[in-house]
């Protein structure tokens, strides 16, 4: 196959990924959260099925980390991890809707004089500071 065809194929594949990403982002604004989480789970499982190299690497890594675990349980762990990743991805994409819908309970942030976590985040964002949230 000439190298020009490979470059075209890669460009087409990347364009398809880009269009898929746009569709997913758009659906994050429209679908109910429960449906979205199910959709995220299905997307992750489809990715797991389609990306065989990554699935094999994960299986090999788990075989090293858990040599006594049967293959079936390692594969189940990979599947459950993919499902959780899909749900978490969806929740991340839906954060603007969650915040706008008042579904987050505000509590005082320690060391801030009683301000909520959201108030502190708003202040940091208004100053142009990046924010990383670890949970």
Image (spheres, rainbow, N blue to C red):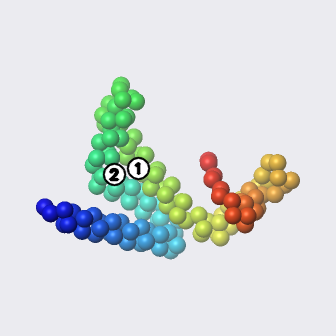
Query: Seen in the image, is 38 located left or right of residue 112?
Result: left
Spatial CA span between label 1 and label 2: 7 Å
Residue visible at 41% across and 46% down?
80
Relative image position of residue 127 (x, y in whole percent): 73, 64
| Element on which disc 2 rests | helix
Residue visible at 74% across and 56% down?
117
Instruction: Tell which residue pokes out farthest to the top in this image.
Output: 68
Mark 1 and mark 2 residues within 8 Å of each other at the beta carbon: yes
Quadrant position of residue 125: bottom right
Q: Which mark is residue 12?
A: none
Query: Seen in the image, is 129 located left or right of residue 41?
Result: right
Classed neighbour count for the residue bearing mark 1: other residues with Cα under 10 Å, few (<14), some (14–19), many (≥20): many
Residue 73 seen: no
Relative image position of residue 45 (x, y in whole percent): 36, 54
Query: Seen in the image, is 28 located left or right of residue 101?
Result: left
Pointer 2: what residue?
48
Pointer 1: what residue?
82
Q: The N terminus is located in which quarter?
A: bottom left
Relative image position of residue 88 (x, y in whole percent): 51, 55
């Amino acid at each position: 196959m000439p190298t020009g065809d490979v470059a075209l194929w890669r460009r087409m594949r990347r364009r398809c990924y880009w269009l898929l990403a746009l569709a997913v982002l758009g659906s994050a604004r429209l679908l109910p959260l429960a449906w979205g989480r199910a959709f995220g789970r299905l997307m992750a499982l489809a990715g797991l099925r389609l990306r065989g190299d990554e699935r094999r690497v994960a299986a090999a890594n788990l075989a090293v980390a858990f040599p006594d675990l049967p293959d079936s349980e390692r594969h189940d762990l990979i599947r459950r991890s993919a499902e959780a990743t899909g749900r978490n991805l969806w929740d991340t994409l839906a954060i603007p809707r969650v915040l706008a819908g008042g579904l987050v309970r505000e509590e005082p942030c320690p060391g801030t004089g009683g301000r909520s976590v959201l108030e502190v985040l708003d202040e940091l964002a208004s100053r142009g500071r990046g924010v990383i949230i670890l949970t």
